[in-house]
Amino acid sequence: MKTKLTGIIEREDDLYVALCPEVDVVSQGHTIDEARKNLIEALELFFECASKNEIKRRLRKEPYIPPVEEMQSRLTEKYKIQDHQLSEMYVTPIEVVHG
């Protein structure tokens, strides 16, 4: 089964943090590509290890790609990030094969 998800990658100091908002899985890397690759690996592990109920509970039916302003607002609220810290943010589609 293939699932289409969203990756939000943001620079934080010397690292890039990658978040998949559909299932609330996070990873990181030293480059954008590495953060994206690590997020895909974390998502594959999530789908491999999580119970069907956990996957169903977390997984949205459609990829979630909100407007940039809304993403910044949500990240600022959830992670207590200051607006000036959101200088580099990338949104990328991710496809994960599982189950």
Image (cartoon, rainbow, N blue to C red):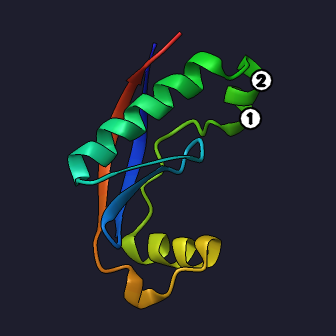
The three-letter amino acid code for the residue at tag 2 is Asn
Left or right: residue 67 compared with residue 25 = left
User: For this rendering, which residue is in front, 94 or 30?
Assistant: 30
Q: Position of residue 18 (x, y in %)?
A: 41, 52
User: For this rendering, which residue is in front, 52 or 66?
Assistant: 52
Q: Position of residue 47 (x, y in %)?
A: 57, 22
Q: Secondary structure at mark 1?
A: helix
Please say if 91 is above or below 69.
above
Q: Disc 1 designates what residue?
A: 57
Left or right: residue 90 compared with residue 63 = left
Residue shown at the point (39%, 48%) measured from the top left: 7
Q: Secondary structure at mark 2?
A: helix
Q: Position of residue 9 (x, y in %)?
A: 35, 57
The circle on residue 53 is 2
Residue shown at the point (28%, 73%) measured from the top left: 88
Marks 1 and 2, how far apart in space?
A: 6 Å
Please say if 73 is above or below 27.
below
Left or right: residue 53 compared with residue 96 = right
Residue shown at the point (31%, 43%) measured from the top left: 36
Q: Quadrant of residue 51?
A: top right
- The 10 Å Cα crowd at callout 2, few under 14, some 14 to 19, many 20 or more, is few
Please say if 19 is above or below 80.
above
Name the outermost residue toward the right: 53
- The 10 Å Cα crowd at callout 1, few under 14, some 14 to 19, many 20 or more, is few
What is the number of callouts on the image?
Answer: 2
Residue shown at the point (26%, 44%) measured from the top left: 34
User: For this rendering, which residue is in front, 14 or 42?
Assistant: 14
The circle on residue 82 is none
Q: Are marks 1 and 2 in contact (CB under 8 Å)?
A: yes
The three-letter amino acid code for the residue at tag 1 is Arg
Q: Position of residue 11 (x, y in %)?
A: 33, 67
